Amino acid sequence: MSQTIQIALVGAGMFGGDVHARAYADLQRFGIAGQLARVGLDMWNRDFADIRFDLVAVATRSEASAKKAAANFKDLTGHEPRAYHGDEPWTDILRDFPDLDVLAVATPDHLHTQPILAALDKGVHVITEKPMCLSIHEADEIIDLAKRRNRVVAVDMHKRYDPDHLRIKNDIQNRIGAPLYGTAYLEEPLEVSTSTFKWVESSDPFSYVGPHWTDLIHSYYQSKPVSLTAIGQKKRLVRDGINAYDAVQVRVDYENGMSINYHNNWITPADFEGPVNQGHEIVGADGKVESDQQYRGFRFWNNGGGSRTSNNHFTRDVARPDGTRGYLGYGVDSLTVGLAAICRMKYHGASRDDVASLYPTAEEARITTAIVHAAAEVRDLNFKYTQEGKGAPVTARFGADGITIVDPMRASEGVEGVFKKVYDRPL
């Protein structure tokens, strides 16, 4: 019996058109077995060896970009998926492919929820880019529907699979003792916010890349947030007529007593030597770990090119004898584990609960979504008060009663009480 996983990709921009498309191209040509050892799932190499993968459709907002993405995929595989375009192209895909197995969602941050819910409603598994969504209410809606439809929602939290981070999780965190405090930063280039993305006013740098770190810290310690504060700045992008935050800083306090500062921006000048600046450090009761993901000791320079660094762990090309190049790295690993879980469910009778430990789940992504949601509320209030010369006194509290915004300035705004409930279910 032919075993085929049909995939459709919605969103073919910087990440969808590169990482997702190239990963699915390799799967379409050679299957998944060759990727499994990288994520510790090679005990299923033989079981998965005959499973085929078929990217049947790719969709973007414009017709030109959809056709370009489909043509690019044909260059990689010899197979051209059907191209769809429009404001809700997933609707047509789900109609035309009633046997679709997976919808891969790589749309802008604020446009994830609608295609995810549409896919789940049709009984289709989902692999989505981070953050899963920007609202804790939407996260609950996604999780509830995924449970009812018995479908996987795998979130691309690829920093979990960085080999340095795996070493920290599986070894170093045990050596440094109980965590006390830490810092995690990811600073994106200016071109991301000024030219690559047209939707930055609907997001912010923490909502965009902060989820990588909040998820990583949660994967290390499995501890939930109890409170946070946040502040943002608007100085650089407004010069280009873009009403968006240049940078956001969020401090999250956790049940286990640790406090982590998350720093993110998307205004790093083009002259910076790396694609992004990123790293994190954690101080424990018995030691400290520092991990610089921007500069790992690999540097080069050339006439006219300046001094550069590269992250050879995220993705890399591997030359094949036929002249093509394989595509692997921890940027692909997060997609692999989601697809492995889906294969287990479709072909080996595994339940949704059976495979939940294999991939970053929607339930885990809910923690990050709660942080992103609360941080946005607190950030905007603190920005407003700071502009008025009143400081940044607003915080958020997480508990059994949900998420509460604590705003001491409410009285001066003519509102009774300092507490504002934004969510009433426990994390």
Image (tube, helix red, strand yellow):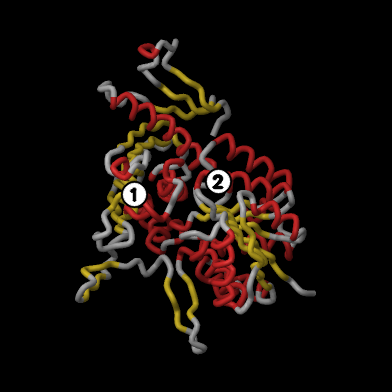
Relative to residue 295, is residue 409 drawn left or right? right
Quarter containing the C terminus: top right
Q: Residues within 10 Å of mark 2 (few under 14, many from 20)?
A: some
Q: Secondary structure at mark 1?
A: strand
Relative to residue 132, is residue 387 drawn left or right? left
Q: Residues within 10 Å of mark 1 (few under 14, many from 20)?
A: many
Relative to residue 28, is residue 169 drawn left or right? left
Earlier residue among tags 1 and 2? 2
Depth order, front residue of 210/402 = 210
Q: Secondary structure at mark 2?
A: helix
Depth order, front residue of 217/192 = 192
Can you tell which quarter of the image residue 304 is in? bottom left
CA distance separating discs 1 and 2: 20 Å
Residue 182, given in percent of the width and then of the height, sits at 31, 44
Depth order, front residue of 124/192 = 192
Residue 302, given in percent of the width and then of the height, sits at 21, 75
The residue at the point 59 percent across, 77 percent down is 77
Query: Which numbered circle lies on residue 111?
Result: 2
Can you tell which quarter of the image residue 52 is in? bottom right
Quarter containing the N terminus: bottom right
The residue at the point 53 percent across, 37 percent down is 135
Query: Which numbered circle lies on residue 266?
Result: 1
**The disc labelled 1 sits on which kind of residue?**
Trp
